[in-house]
Amino acid sequence: MNIIKHGLRFRGSFTYRNRTDEIIWHHAEANCTVEDIHSWHLNNGWIGCGYNLIIYKDGTVHEGRPLNAVGAHASGHNSRSVGVCCIGRYDVETMPKEQLDAAKQVQAYLKGLYPGAATKRHKDVNATSCPGKNFPFSEISGASAGSVDVTTSDVQAQSSDDWCARLQKECNAQKFSKQKVDNIPGPDTLAGCPTLGRKSRGKITALMQERLNALGYDCGAVDGINGTKTQAAIKAFQRDYGLVADGIVGPKTWSKLLGLS
Ligand SMILES: [Zn+2]
């Protein structure tokens, strides 16, 4: 098994667990990247990504915090549990086979590392619906302990990593805002995003398309033209996130695109 490290910059130092009694499983309740989770958790005022491991839908395994660091994922249990998060929304989606296979392998690995640890869902320890009713918990937790060889690799910074910074910069350049360009979405970022009408055009429209594409919605080419395909993608996104599907990217839609609420 390979664990991909993202070179995340944490705002503070880790504390480390001296015991690991629980393996706690989560879903992200979103289709997103490690970088997204990291910025959301920074935005919560945490030092950064709260999970130790994150499993993508393609079956790749990613490091959030180091495996033996205390996480921020299950209130009251962080100091003695390892937190694993599967990308996706398993309240409504079904887990792809690649991700399920990877999750079983991670479970086998963690059981091997922490033989006495109990395997739980987030909802078993806190008042939450995480990881969702469709999460295949019994299949994952049933994986038996194994000695899994682990390698690590570094992810190359992807172009979407600085998406928020480029958006902040463009909103400033077009005089919609005068905000700090720090690549961390916050209230100033949201306030600086102009409402994009159904036929918007330009660099901010292109950034909106880029984001929707990265989140798994299909705007087609990132061309800065809000056409038929982009409209369909916006409306699908709005429906999925419980917004009025009007094709207009106003504050509520921007807020979801920024991962703020
Ligand atoms: Zn959770």
Image: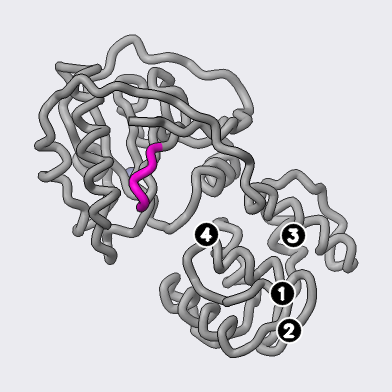
Task: Tell me: 117 left or right of 18.
Answer: left
| Residue 20 rendering spot, x and y as whole percentages | 27, 18
Q: Which residue is mark 3?
A: 167
Queried on whether the Cβ of the residue with tag 4 lies below 8 angstroms from ligand 1, the answer reads no
Q: Which mark is residue 200?
A: 2
**Mark 4 Cα within 10 Å, few/some/many (few <14, many 20+)?**
few
Amino acid type at circle 4 is: Ser
Task: Tell me: 242 left or right of 135.
Answer: right
**Mark 1 Cα within 10 Å, few/some/many (few <14, many 20+)?**
many
Q: Is residue 100 above or below residue 152?
A: below
Q: Earlier in the sequence, mark 2 or mark 3?
A: 3
Residue drawn at x 59%, y 90% is 228
Kindly check if marks 2 and 4 are in contact, taking CB atoms under 8 A apart as contact. Answer: no
Mark 1 → mark 4, Cα distance in angstroms: 21 Å
| Residue 98 rendering spot, x and y as whole percentages | 28, 50
The verdict on residue 59 being magenta is yes
Helix, strand or loop at label 1? It is helix
Q: Quadrant of the N terminus?
A: top left
Helix, strand or loop at label 3? It is helix
